[in-house]
Amino acid sequence: MNRFVSAGAVFLAAVLIIVGIVAVSPGEGSTASGTSTGDFRVDGPNGNVVEVDLVARETTQEIAPDVNYQVWTFNGTAPGPVIRVQLGDTVRFTLTNDSSIGMQHSIDFHAALTPWDKNYQPVDPGETLTFDWVAMYPGVFMYHCGVDPVLQHIGNGMYGAIIVETDALPAEREFVLVASEFYPGAKPIDGVFVGDLDRMKAVEPEYVVFDGLANRYLESPLQVRPDEPFRIWVVNAGPTLTNAFHVIGTLFPHVYPSGNPTSPMNGLQTWNIPPGDGAMFELQIPEEGVYPFVTHAFAYTGLGSVGAIQVSDDAPPKPESYPTFADPFSAGVLPIDDAGLTPEPSPEPSAAPSVEPTTEPSAEPAACEPDGTTIDVMAMESVFDADCLAAPAGKRFEIVFDNMDAGIPHNVAIYTDEGAGTPLFVGEVFNGPDVVTYDVPALDAGTYFFRCDVHPTTMTGTFVVA
């Protein structure tokens, strides 16, 4: 008899535990702040279709005061436009590749459920790709180019934030921040820095920023009113570093990993956002003043990862709504048109920028010697396999160039010196994997300079004619 009573007591306790779990389940109902969450995702489209068009192009952008950088972008800015859709919307997406340097580009929406081998493949210059996907999960997500090497495409600026909104969140003032890193080469060419893939691989950033510019929101802080509830959506584009997001002088009542409103974390001081992820931060600051926001990884904070929130009664009213396509340099508040951004490309650096020409060959001693009239050179992972090439003086010769980098354009060009002001020979730019043989006219004896014009600071070497 006692055995049956004990078994019944255990069964009753188990039922009570299960009932208790169901009663406190966050899947339906409210969070600690009283926000209705609904489910963590939807199962199908809501019938609304949103047209989203992105154009991949290269242009020049200031990433720090007086530092111009050749960015690879979506719609001419790094980061690209802040995109907003509603949970359950069908996104009718079109990518146009308008590359001026022969680069393949692609798209990867972290918010989408769609086959990689169908919709995330490289798009050739001049070509267009269109596909539909349904926004099934609410939150804040990264989008980026996924062409190999992805490190180089993201490191040069091809990323942005997309927010999938839900009615579960109350209307509040909102800001969108995209954290990222820049890795310029050692010196500018024609006043413009280009990305250094070796520095990207070594994780040696020159700048760690929010919204594409070092210390962007120090002089123009984000503005809110005292005791006003507001939220900040943050995406960490990386490509490599974790962003330890922190606001000095306050705490986060609630943090939502990936921005999903069914996953609240309460009363946090700092939240780590890995590269390729995001979070939504809810704040409410009672006292007027300035509250800096930073990455709390302080080896990188001083590289430009600092902004400010100005809490003041003089803050403007919160917007009634936020645009589907928003200016990334206004923290996602202004429409693209109001921000003065247009779909036309900005002035671009040439694929082979130059400085003042030099006509005389270098007097430096030869680093290698000619061995016949055929020169073999290979590019792999955007690096030449030799840093010295040699040809006989006064004889025509050929360069057999093997570009092993799939979808990445390279060439071989010979200049009188490192300034690249006077070309002696400029080979055709072509995408790998492929092999091209260049027929090069006879050159006078001397020590010259060769490079890839598409990657003019990372793919270089000495060219000896003797």
Image (cartoon, helix red, strand yellow):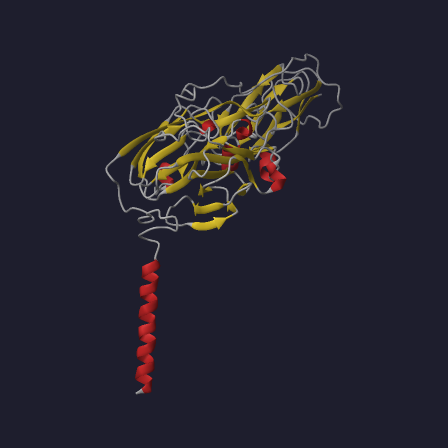
Work out whether residue 228 can be spotted.
Answer: yes
Residue 98 placement (x, y as % from top left): 42, 23
**Quick check: 134 left or right of 455?**
left
Q: Nearer the viewer, residue 275 or 450?
A: 275
User: Vertically, is 189 above or below 85?
Assistant: above
Q: How many marks?
A: 0
Residue 346 placement (x, y as % from top left): 47, 18
Q: Nearer the viewer, residue 173 or 396?
A: 173
Would you identify the image quadrant in which residue 80 lies?
top left
Would you identify the image quadrant in which residue 389 lies?
top right
Residue 296 placement (x, y as % from top left): 58, 42
Q: Which quarter of the image is occupied by the N terminus?
A: bottom left
**Quick check: 271 left or right of 87?**
right
Q: Which quarter of the image is occupied by the C terminus?
A: top right
Q: What is the residue that sits farthest to the left in this orientation?
A: 47
Residue 42 placement (x, y as % from top left): 29, 46
**Quick check: 66 left or right of 345?**
right
Residue occupying image coordinates x 35% and y 58%: 24
Q: Nearer the viewer, residue 423 or 218?
A: 218
User: Vertically, is 133 above or below 38?
Assistant: above
**Quick check: 388 left or right of 162?**
right
Work out whether residue 145 can be spotted.
Answer: no
